[in-house]
Image (tube, grey):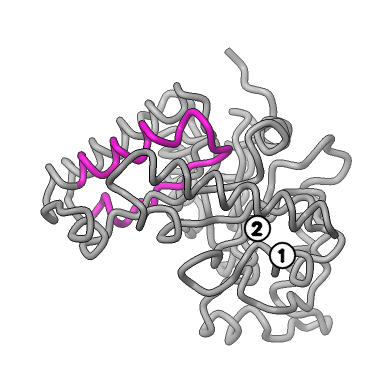
Amino acid sequence: MTLAPFGARLRHAMDTRGPLCVGIDPHASLLASWGLNDDIAGLERFTRTVVDALADRVAVLKPQSAFFERFGSRGIAVLEKAVEEARAAGALVLMDAKRGDIGSTMGAYAAAYLDKDSPLFSDAVTVSPYLGFGSLRPALDAAAISGAGVFVLALTSNPEGAEVQRATAADGRSLAQLMLDHMAAENAGATPLGSVGAVVGATLGDAGADLSINGPLLAPGIGAQGATPADLPRVFGAAVGNVVPSVSRGVLCHGPDASGLREAAGRFADEVRAAVSED
């Protein structure tokens, strides 16, 4: 079955379930806070609990691939099952892998996450453009074929990112703005929303860039990193309606009780709705 374009599916999910992405980040300290061991059994229990609690109600679930990869093939098997079960329950799955390479290697990454026959096929994947935006072409093309999406790092929430992202290109634009302009070109004419998104940190205060890319804006940094839903209009301005705020620890710290996870996710979603509607 051919999927509708990711942008259209994301817009529908945001409108019906609320504009919220919840990360699945099973790092050792969080497993310990849940009373779980930092092993495959703990990883599997944690992941299944999050998926069972939230996949039928949040718009997007975002597993952080690295926290599964550290367990080798057994961890990847847990990730594969989580992707399958989350999508079956109606959540869109954004694989947070931040892949970036060139040529056939980028093509192989695209096949891993954006080919519908792959056991890791996800609705979207995060990628890094700093080998040049053109290096992402295999992923962009694969996503277009499968109806998936791509989120491109633009203005990230870590302070070190400014070294590269705020640097000036030959034509005077910042490198981040150059990447955002490439994304806008990819999304030109798409309705109701393009399928090429940008990653823009909610902690930036002022993005200082033109975010009108006609695509989704993944906004990490809500919750434990210090940003709140009330900050979104100031950071994203006129593009705030296309923002997908991402919360990880702010929700996950309320586990392992499923009702605690649901209540925290619902509270964040309500706060985002209120912040966006007030803008």
- In the picture provided, is 109 more to the left or to the right than 119? right
Q: CA distance from mark 1 to mark 2?
A: 30 Å
Give residue 57's position: percent from left, percent from top: 53, 32
1 and 2 marks in contact (CB < 8 Å): no
Front-lying residue, 123 or 179: 123
- In the picture provided, is 84 more to the left or to the right than 141? left
- The residue positioned 70% from the left and 54% from the top of the image is 243
Q: Main secondary structure of the magenta part?
A: helix
In the image, which residues are magenta?
Answer: 43-69
- Residue 163 lies in quadrant: bottom right
Q: Secondary structure at mark 1?
A: helix
Mark 2, other Cα within 10 Å: few <14 / some 14–19 / many ≥20: few
- The residue positioned 46% from the left and 69% from the top of the image is 224
Front-lying residue, 215 or 139: 215
| Mark in the foreground, 1 or 2 | 1
Q: Secondary structure at mark 2?
A: helix
Magenta span contains residue 206: no
Magenta span contains residue 46: yes
Q: Any mark on residue 232, and which?
A: 1
What kind of residue is marked 2? Answer: Gly
Mark 1, other Cα within 10 Å: few <14 / some 14–19 / many ≥20: many
- The residue positioned 61% from the left and 41% from the top of the image is 149
Give residue 167's position: percent from left, percent from top: 67, 86
Which residue is label 2 attached to?
134
Seen in the picture, residue 96 relative to 225 is either above or below; the reply is above
What kind of residue is marked 1? Answer: Leu
Give residue 229's position: percent from left, percent from top: 65, 62
Q: Any mark on residue 189, and which?
A: none
Seen in the picture, residue 192 relative to 212 is either above or below; the reply is above
Q: How many marks?
A: 2
